[in-house]
Image (cartoon, rainbow, N blue to C red):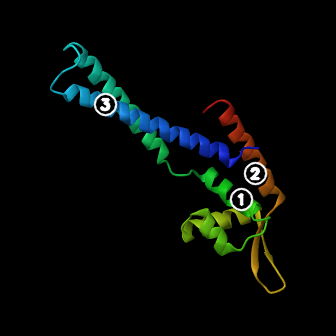
Amino acid sequence: MISTRNHKKKKKKYTRTLYFLISILWLINLLLLSPGRIFPPGSKILFRTFSIIVFVVVYFKVDKMNKKRDRLEVIYDFLRIIQDNHNSIKPTPLLRKSNLSSQSFNDYFEELLSKDFVKEIYDKKKKRYITLSDKGFHYLEKYKTILGFIDDFDL
């Protein structure tokens, strides 16, 4: 089972790497622009090339960090929130915790309901609750397997 703690550690490590690369980029540019010119003139091209490489790496890392969740991640988060709340949650808290707009929430909810991933249950007071079906639990298991595969191969 993949814990969120492992993902938070990875994100923290990723952020530290990003800060380190930005610091390197800043230092290289500072050394290139310094009036004392610590390094021989021929190394200027090498430093500029390295600086460009570091900049490109930082750019792609930031781009990857700002990536939106894809459809499968949203479905996984949606189902996991229900599971984490003892397999029973009202629609409004689910909407807030899923971090979706109300329109997106309704679209995902209708899809998951029509494909039997979730069920609507009404209690004695006619309050509506959303629970996972067996198919929803199966999806969570398979998705965690995929996450484990990705972690094992550092993808």
Q: Marks 1 and 2: which is nearer the front?
A: 1
Q: Are marks 1 and 2 in contact (CB under 8 Å)?
A: yes
User: Closer to the N terminus: mark 3 or mark 1?
Assistant: 3
| Type of amino acid under label 2 | Tyr
> Where residue 79 is drawn, which disc sits there?
1
Q: Residues within 10 Å of mark 3 (few under 14, many from 20)?
A: few
Helix, strand or loop at mark 2: helix
Horizontal side of 11 relative to 42 (left or right) equals: right
Name of the residue lying farthest toward the left:
35
Q: Is residue 43 left or right of residue 18?
A: left
In this figure, which residue is indicated by the disc labeled 3?
A: 27
Quick one: 84 or 8, which is closer to the camera?
8
Residue 71 appears in the figure = yes
Q: Do the CB atoms of the residues marked 3 and 2 lie less than 8 Å apart? A: no
Closer to us: 36 or 63: 36
Of discs 3 and 1, which sits in the foreground?
3
Query: Could you give the CA–CA distance between mark 3 and mark 1, rounded to whole angstroms?
Result: 46 Å
Tell me which residue sits at (48%, 45%) in the image.
65
Q: In this view, does 48 lie to the left or right of 75?
A: left
Q: Earlier in the sequence, mark 1 or mark 2?
A: 1
Task: Check residue 139 in the rendering and tell me which mark sits there, or answer none.
Answer: 2
Q: Quadrant of the C terminus?
A: top right
